[in-house]
């Protein structure tokens, strides 16, 4: 029984260490804890917040470890239960391992260590990893108010029939990166291509300016998403 207790302590320490590391990369504590537990148990990792893990190189590595450790832990727990009456639990080595993990957790919880990790994992790692390994948030959203938004062109949109050359004369602090037309991506000719209903603009810039300039299109998008959710709930 003591073997299982000590091993659960090890699992607890691994969770807390992983939460601190995830937090140090910029995640909020509640999100970090939920995603760590989800990864470790293989459950609940289907939320939109999972993109925060998959889009960050350090978080992905921590996530891979947690998935493997979770699978190993399940095997250990099953083995422990099946041999609970065995005389040799190897309790001493396991206790030493738990003590080491506890010491690591205590060090990671120190304010100075947390400050160092936060700076190290949010700045230095961005310089270490290739640009394509980083998420859009970390590459483009550098200032408060920055946004990367997809804006669909509906049938009622005032932009249908216009080119981005015409539209962009009115835009301030906004960049249209591409036009998505079905399976076709228009980049080089995006400024001179007449927009059609069904097109999707991928826009980078100030969020308030995007919402102001594309209020009608975004309202139609929200209405369409609401209708789709309602239709799905009826199935």
Image (cartoon, rainbow, N blue to C red):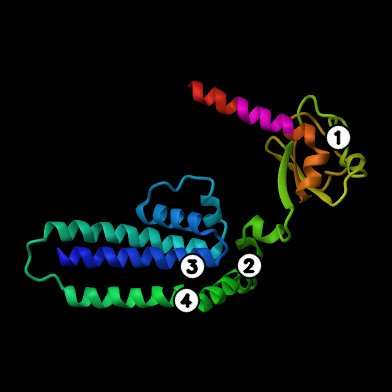
Marks 2 and 4, the one that precedes in the sequence: 4
Real-space CA distance between mark 2 and mark 1, rounded to the nearest whole angstrom: 35 Å
Q: Position of residue 218 (x, y in %)?
A: 73, 35
The residue indicated by pointer 1 is 194
Q: Are marks 2 and 4 in contact (CB under 8 Å)?
A: no
Tell which tag, 1 or 3, sits nearer the viewer: 3
- Quarter location, residue 229: top right
Q: Position of residue 75 (x, y in %)?
A: 24, 58
The residue indicated by pointer 2 is 130
Marks 2 and 3, the one that precedes in the sequence: 3
Tell which tag, 2 or 3, sits nearer the viewer: 3
Sort mark 2 into few (<14), some (14-19) or many (20+) by Cα contacts within 10 Å.
few
Real-space CA distance between mark 3 and mark 4, rounded to the nearest whole angstrom: 13 Å
Marks 1 and 4, the one that precedes in the sequence: 4
Real-space CA distance between mark 2 and mark 4, rounded to the nearest whole angstrom: 30 Å
Question: The residue tagged with tag 1: helix, strand or loop?
Answer: loop
Q: Which mark is residue 131?
A: none
Q: Position of residue 227 (x, y in %)?
A: 61, 25
Residue 126 drawn above or below residue 63: below
- Looking at the image, residue 213 sits to the left or right of residue 166; the answer is left
What's drawn in magenta, residue-wise?
A: 219-227
Q: How many marks?
A: 4
- Say which residue appears at 81% left-offset and 29% top-offset: 157
Real-space CA distance between mark 1 and mark 4, rounded to the nearest whole angstrom: 58 Å
Sort mark 1 into few (<14), some (14-19) or many (20+) by Cα contacts within 10 Å.
some
């Amino acid at each position: 029984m003591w073997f299982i207790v000590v091993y659960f302590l090890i699992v607890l320490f691994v969770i807390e260490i992983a939460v601190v590391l995830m937090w140090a990369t910029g995640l909020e504590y509640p999100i970090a804890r939920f995603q760590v537990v989800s990864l470790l148990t293989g459950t609940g990792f289907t939320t939109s917040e999972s993109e925060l893990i998959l889009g960050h190189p350090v978080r992905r590595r921590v996530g891979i470890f947690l998935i493997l450790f979770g699978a190993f832990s399940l095997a250990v727990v099953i083995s422990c239960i099946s041999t609970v009456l065995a005389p040799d639990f190897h309790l001493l080595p396991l206790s030493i391992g738990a003590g080491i993990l506890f010491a690591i957790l205590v060090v990671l919880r120190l304010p100075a260590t947390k400050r160092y990790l936060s700076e190290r994992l949010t700045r230095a790692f961005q310089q270490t990893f290739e640009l394509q390994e980083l998420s859009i948030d970390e590459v483009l959203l550098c200032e408060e108010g920055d946004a990367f938004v997809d804006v669909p062109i509906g049938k009622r949109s005032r932009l249908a029939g216009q080119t981005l050359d015409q539209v962009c004369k009115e835009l301030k602090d906004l960049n249209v990166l591409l036009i998505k037309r079905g399976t076709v991506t228009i980049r080089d000719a995006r400024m001179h291509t007449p927009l059609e209903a069904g097109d999707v603009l991928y826009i980078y810039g100030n969020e308030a300016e995007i919402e102001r300039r594309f209020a009608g299109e975004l309202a139609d998008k929200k209405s369409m998403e609401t209708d789709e959710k309602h239709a799905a709930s009826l199935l």
